[in-house]
Image (cartoon, rainbow, N blue to C red):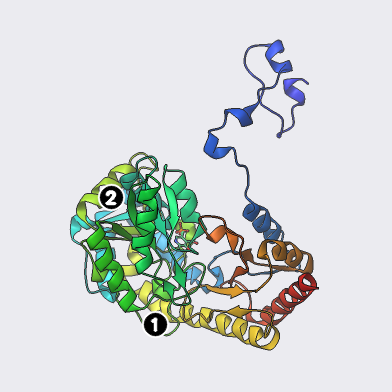
Amino acid sequence: MSATSSSPLSPVTGAAGPAAAEAPLEWHERLALRAQGGPSELSAILALAAAGGDLVDFSGGFPDTTLYDTDLLGEIAAKQIGTRPEVALQYASNWGLPSLREALRADIARNQGHVPGEDELMVTSGGVDALTLACKAMLDDGDAVLVEAPSYLGAFNVIRSHGGEPVSMRNDEHGLVPASVREAAEAARAAGRTPKFVYVIPDFQNPSGLLLAEDRRRELVDLCRELGLLLLEDVAYRDLAFDGSYLRSIYEIGPDVTVQTGTFSKTFTPGTRMGWACGPATVIRAMAEAKTNTDQCAGALGQCILEALITEGHYAASLPRIREAYAARASALVGAFEDRLDGLATWTVPEGGFFTWLDVPGVDTKELAGVGIENGVAFVPGSPFFADGRASAQLRMSFSRTPAERMAEGVDRLARSIERLRG
Ligand SMILES: Cc1ncc(COP(=O)(O)O)c(C=O)c1O
């Protein structure tokens, strides 16, 4: 094979002349061990779902971009570029633009009773970046991170790629069971691992859709204080209660032991990758330092647009309309469940966010996902949402992007898939 005839999928030929070109390098073996796993089963399902066609897609946690006021965003972007190009088109500080940090502190005061100090908040490139920076700041090789079971699967990958090991706590039908923090911390120590932080998504959790009650939040803070553990509170869906209400955040209850991470990917747009982290200054300073060796800073143009949206009141003003749209979809989906899934499955009834979590007793939902695709419906099976990868009879459905009029058809396809597997 000659170098010129290589297809894009062929191994790259070396620079040592014709002999080397005859013996293609095995790049796979040279990848880092953590990169050799290849695409997960989940990637395969998501790729199928992305194929489109007549599929009713309940898989990804994507916002609906038709809910955004694109004229307004266009105007704001043009104004920011036109009036402050030296800021909008330049590198920003690793902490984020001071003016956006100020706006974010004021926005936190909109729904939380504790406001971070100037050195207690930084801007991140979305939620995953905030998690990444927390791992870089907190984890040494082999350390444990206590995670909900189930939890956001993207977090497991981030923890593992920073040398950490996610260790499962216990969740029940109301969300995380606080007492299981102690059990998981002890299990981690028995396995020779130092537990460093507890990762929790209290508001309309990914994947369960559940809202963690305030007494459980308080108990978590008390336990973490006693055990000397940091709480990492991920508030990705906090602004999306369908009735616009808020429970006290974990950060508000225990600012001395909590780093809160947030993202605007669900309520504004993932197109600008904007998020924040706030918490004890020592940890935030270490996270800001870590940002200098990831992407250096969040994109300044996105920061300028977000700042204008917040300070001119557009962000808060947009929330009622967005909540109403997601509430209508959740209600259409749950209505379709009631009509078609009775006796086949049970489900959580979301009061906010993007997700509902189904239990399909006696069915391996990984197998069901394959049958579902054949029948024209996509969802995410439960197993990847557990850090120990246990087999699961549960599955996550996201209603955020599915038109209300497609819900009944999608649920009928799911029901037929369950019936086919049960025989
Ligand atoms: C709980 C949770 N945290 C973080 C993220 C990632 O946020 P971002 O897309 O802003 O990186 C998601 C996205 O699905 C999420 O569900």
Which residue is at the front of the view, 414 or 312? 414
Amino acid on which disc 1 is placed = Gly
Tell me the distance, in whole angstroms, between the alpha carbons under discs 2 and 1. Answer: 30 Å
User: What is the quadrant of residue 91 in the picture?
Assistant: top left
**Residue 365 position in % (x across, y down):** 66, 65
Question: Dividing the image into 4 quarters, which one contains the N terminus?
Answer: top right
Looking at the image, which residue is at 72% across and 59% down?
A: 51
**Residue 316 position in % (x across, y down):** 36, 75
Q: Residue furthest front?
A: 190
One can see residue 73 in this view: yes
Return the mark for residue 244: 1
User: What is the quadrant of residue 378 in the picture?
Assistant: bottom right
| Residue linked to disc 2 | 95
**Mark 1, other Cα within 10 Å: few <14 / some 14–19 / many ≥20:** some
Identify the element where label 1 is drawn.
Answer: loop
**Residue 49 position in % (x across, y down):** 68, 61
Q: Is mark 2 within 8 Å of ligand 1?
A: no
Q: Is residue 419 above or below residue 130?
A: below
Looking at the image, which residue is at 62% across and 87% down?
A: 335
